Every structure is written in structure tokens, then in C-alpha cells.
Image: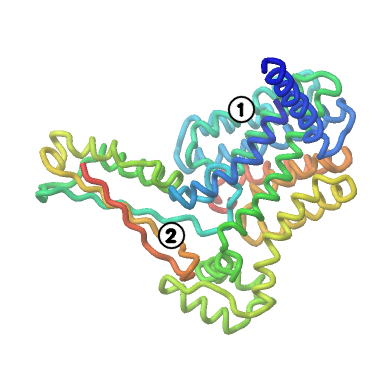
Amino acid sequence: MYMGIASSRHRLVDSLTGFAPWLLGRTGIEDGRLASIRAYLLVRALLFVLAFDAAKQFLRRGHTVGAILCGASLLFGLAIRTKKSLRPAATLACAAIATTFVVVTFPTTANHGYATWLLCVTALWIQRLKGQDRMAGLALARWLAAIIMFWSGAQKLLHGTYDHGEFLASQIAVHAQRFAGPLSVVISEADLAHLVESQAGSGTFEFTSWQALSLSRAIPIAELLLGVGLLFGTTRLAAAWVAALFVLAIQLVAGEITFAMVMLGVLSTFYPARQMAAISDVITLVFIVAAALALSPIGVDAIN
Amino acid sequence: MSAAAIVVLLLWPGIHFVLCKTKGVNPWKLGGWAMYVVRSPAVNVRVRVEPPGLGRMGEACERERQKFLVRRNSVGSFARPDALARCLRQPSEPGNNRTVFVDVAERVFDGDSRTFAVKMTSYSY
């Protein structure tokens, strides 16, 4: 009996140690040095995302902590680009600032805050690893992209609020001016009139035209498939680009730039290094402008 | 460790869905990636005492009320108004030596009727 228990334990260990490399390999294998470069490119963009988020918190609540986090993020964001020797300190600062942010804002932390925190901590971990082990950290970052895409779609299907266009309909009813324009090509006039009328009460919120229903049902399926597509070599790069365009399009309509940029950053870990570097620069620029706007007399609510 | 973290990240949104359905957790919060599933729930809190008391709640209790509102909006029924009730039962507050009732009204989307409905939960102290 003792021999039986020992051998079953060995079988369990064997299966787990075989499962882990399989899991990590699903998002592609690269040289460990490239993983380290990717971690740096992520951090140098995320520091400015953190600066913007902290600027918004400082202005909305007048918290000293927000001002300190904003200043620290900007300082390390500039430092990481000027001296290579400062990268370890900037990466540690990124993880510390992101962690502080989540702790201070919990449980109201926005999901992009969790994504940023996970990426910052992963980047720090990549930096501490040696050689090819760094790929384990990069795999975690890439898996985060796949998980977010997959579960965004799966949650919509599970909650069932895209079967009859319920969510989109309720958003159009409340934010008619923002959404009705972009979606007018697929929403019938009858649907739109009904939604505007429903806005005064509590419903019903649904579409009847086949075009609007098709769009609503396609969204979660597309997200799910894109998430899965990131896990196979033949579809990985295409899925990463299509997912980026998909997320950007949706977030532009919704007016949510922060999550869009964080997703762009994590999806860029699948792109060739030069393209990832260019995207890192774009994200940095967007958030320098956003942070400046947030701190300017124009006001906090101009950017979200 | 990386594989373990991936497994946790893979499983958590499923658990998050269950918590949204059973405990009223806000789908937009707690990293379940369920944004744009429903409109963020709207929560309101009403406080009453029996027998009816004199005066309004003080600033400290109003702050507790706001804190509870924020937590309730994020974590659903995991957030209880215990701290608010304790504040209201202090000597200078209207709940002193009285029964305090905290009524929580949450506007949620009902998928079957495709309308918004108000879900009421009452706590007594």
C-alpha cells in the first residue's frame, strides 16, 4: 500500500511538472533576453499610465498620496528612459506604485488598475529571473492578455446581457447622444425610438432588428475567439493585432482610454520587439498628454 | 509559480461570476473582466430608527454611510452596514437606545424582463 501511495504521488508530480511547461509554452517561446527587453518596454509605458491614474485620484479626492504617486511615476518614467542603470529601480518603483494604488483604492479599484498591477509585478519578476527563465514571466503577461479577452467574452455570455442586446440597448438609452451616432448604421429607427422612450422608465432594453442583434451577439464570441487565438502559433500574431483594433474601437466608443492603452500594452508583448517599442512610445505620449490635461485647468473629466 | 498564477487568473473570473450572481458583487470590480456586461449597479441607503428619533445623523455617521455606499457598490452583500449602525447608536446620534434599521436599495438589471429592478435589503440593529 505504501508503494502504491508513493507511486501515485510521483504520478501527480510528473503530471504537474509536465503541465506547467505546456501552459507556459502556449503563448510562444522567445529568447530570455528579449523577454527582459519586453518587460522594460512595458514598464516605461505603464509608469505614465500610473501617473495619469494618480493625477485623476489626486484631483478627485485631493489626496496627498495621489500627488506623491503621480510625481514618483513621472520621475521614474523619465528616469527609465535616460539611464539603463536606473531600469531596476524604475521597475521596482513601478511595482511599488501600482501595488500602493491597488491597496489604497480597494475595493473600488478599476479593472485596468489590477491589470496594470499584474503587469508591473510580472515585469519586476522578469527582471529578477535569469536567462531563459525570464520566459516564464513573459508567459504570465501574455496569458493575462488571453485571459482578459477570453473572459470578457465569456462573462458577457454567462450574464446573458448580449443575447437580445440588453446591455448595448441600456447604454444607448442612457447615453443616446454618445452611442446612437456610431451605432446608427445597425440600429433601426424603431429600436432607437423605443430605447429613448424606455430611458424615462426602467425598460425594456432590447433590440429587435437583426443587424443590431447580430452585432450584439457577435461581440462576446469575437472576444472569446480572440483570446483563444492568442494561444496557438498559427493565429497568435493575427489575433494580437485584431484584438488590439477590437479593444481600441470599443474603448473609443465607450470613451475609456486607460483600459484600451493597458490592453494595447499587454497585447504588444506578442508583436515583434520594434513594433512593441513603438507602441510603448505611443502609450507614453498618450498618457503624458492625458496627465497634463488632468492636471490642467481644463479639468479631470475631460479624459477617462 | 508562473503556472500557478496563470491557473489562478484563469479560474478567478468564473468564481467572480458566481459572486456577482449570489452576492451582488459589481461585475465592473474585483478583476473578473466583466466590464460592459451590465450598467454599474446604483446603490442607495436609507436609515431609520424605531421609535422615531430626533435629529439628523452627525458628520461622522454620514461619512460611515458614504463609506458603506462605496463598499456596497463594489462588493455587494459582502459589505454590511455594521459600522454605520454602531455609529448611529452612539450617545449623540439618533439611534441611541433605539433599534436602527438600514435599508439598502440596489438597482439591478433583470435579464428575464430586460428592465431595471430595485432590490431591497434591510438590516436591523
Residue B46: give x, y in percent of width and height: 26, 52
Closest to the observer, A88 or A81: A88
| Element marked by disc 1 | helix
Residue A210: give x, y in percent of width and height: 67, 78
Residue drawn at the location 72% of the way across and 32% of the way down: A43
The image shows residue A85, relative to residue A177, as above or below, that is: above
Closest to the observer, A141 or A100: A141
Which mark is nearer the camera, 1 or 2? 2
| Element marked by disc 2 | strand
Q: CA distance from mark 1 to mark 2?
A: 39 Å
Residue drawn at the location 71% of the way across and 54% of the way down: A224
Closest to the observer, A159 or A282: A159
The disc placed on residue B52 is: none
Q: Farthest residue to the top: give it.
A: A2
Count of marks, rendered view: 2
Q: Residues within 10 Å of mark 1 (few under 14, many from 20)?
A: many
Residue drawn at the location 74% of the way across and 28% of the way down: A16
Residue highlighted by disc 2: B108
Tell me which chain the residue with mark 2 is part of. Answer: B
Tell me which chain the residue with mark 1 is part of. Answer: A
Residue highlighted by disc 1: A72
Query: Does residue A83 appear in the picture of this structure?
Result: yes
